[in-house]
């Protein structure tokens, strides 16, 4: 179940990044994160920290809750 949550969160982050027409490289640079780490988050391999989620939401101009749409516990 945990892996499924990470996967869905990662897919939601990726969808919002693409919606804003940002490459992974641009996104990573804007949130001060390595490209490989962003890739792992979007693939659901790892989870972002709360601070990383805050930075992502700020760069994408969305509320943090948007990343959790469609995710049920």
Image: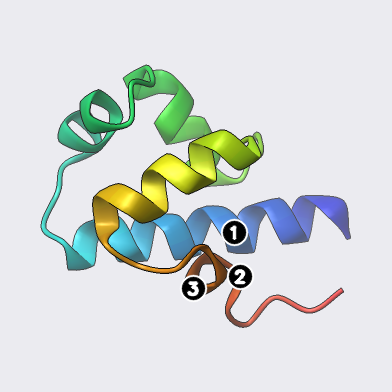
Disc sitting over residue 66 in the figure: 3
Q: Is residue 33 above or below residue 50?
A: above
Q: Is residue 48 left or right of residue 38?
A: right
Q: Is residue 51 above or below residue 43?
A: above
| Marks 1,3: beta carbons within 8 A | no
Quadrant (top left, top right, bottom left, bottom right) of the C terminus: bottom right
**Residue 8 position in % (x across, y down):** 61, 64
**Residue 23 position in % (x across, y down):** 16, 42
Quadrant (top left, top right, bottom left, bottom right) of the N terminus: bottom right
| Marks 1,2: beta carbons within 8 A | yes
**Residue 29 position in % (x across, y down):** 22, 24
Q: How many marks?
A: 3
Residue under label 1: 9
Quarter residue 25 falls in: top left
27 or 53, which lies in front? 53
Residue under label 2: 68
> In terms of secondary structure, where does tag 3 sit?
helix
Q: CA distance from mark 2 to mark 3?
A: 5 Å
Q: CA distance from mark 1 to mark 3?
A: 10 Å
Report whether residue 48 is seen: no
> In terms of secondary structure, where does tag 2 sit?
helix
């Amino acid at each position: 179940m945990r892996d499924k949550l990470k996967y869905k969160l990662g897919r939601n982050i990726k969808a919002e990044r693409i919606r804003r027409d940002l490459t992974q490289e641009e996104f990573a640079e804007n949130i001060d994160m390595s490209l490989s780490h962003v890739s792992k988050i979007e693939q659901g391999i790892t989870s972002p920290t709360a601070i990383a989620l805050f930075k992502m939401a700020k760069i994408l101009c969305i509320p943090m809750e948007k990343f959790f749409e469609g995710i049920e516990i």
